[in-house]
Image (cartoon, rainbow, N blue to C red):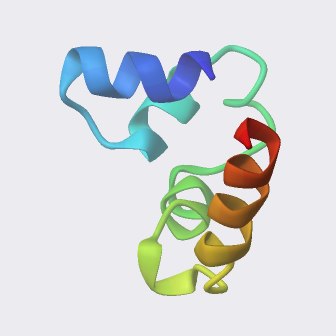
């Protein structure tokens, strides 16, 4: 995920890194990017994702 790597490397929020991508900027407003990356909106699927990864590694 280049956007995540860019955000981590530059110490900026993920939403800011997304908007900096040429393919994203014309399609997503700054507010939309912030809303999509806001942890308050997460659906709580982390446990299922972790379980899938661990099952692949087993």
Q: Quadrant of residue 25?
A: top right
Q: Quadrant of the N terminus?
A: top right
Would residue 37 appear left or right of 49 to someone viewing this image?
A: left
Which residue sits at x=71%, y=37%?
Answer: 57
Task: Give whichever of 23, 53 is nearer the camera.
Answer: 53
Would residue 36 appear left or right of 31 to someone viewing this image?
A: right
Task: Give whichever of 22, 11 is nearer the camera.
Answer: 11
Q: Position of residue 6 (x, y in %)?
A: 41, 17
Classify 32 as above or below 41.
Answer: above
Which residue sits at x=23%, y=17%?
Answer: 10
Q: Quadrant of the C terminus?
A: top right
Which residue sits at x=56%, y=83%?
Answer: 41
Q: Position of residue 11 (x, y in %)?
A: 18, 28
Classify 19 as above or below 44.
Answer: above
Q: Quadrant of residue 36?
A: bottom right
Which residue sits at x=44%, y=74%?
Answer: 39
Would residue 45 appear left or right of 16 to someone viewing this image?
A: right
Q: Position of residue 13 (x, y in %)?
A: 32, 43
């Amino acid at each position: 995920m280049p956007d995540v790597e860019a955000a981590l490397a530059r110490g900026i929020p993920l939403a800011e890194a997304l908007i900096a991508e040429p393919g994203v900027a014309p399609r997503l407003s700054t507010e939309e990017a912030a809303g999509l990356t806001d942890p308050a909106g997460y659906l709580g699927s982390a446990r299922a994702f972790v379980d899938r990864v661990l099952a692949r590694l087993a």
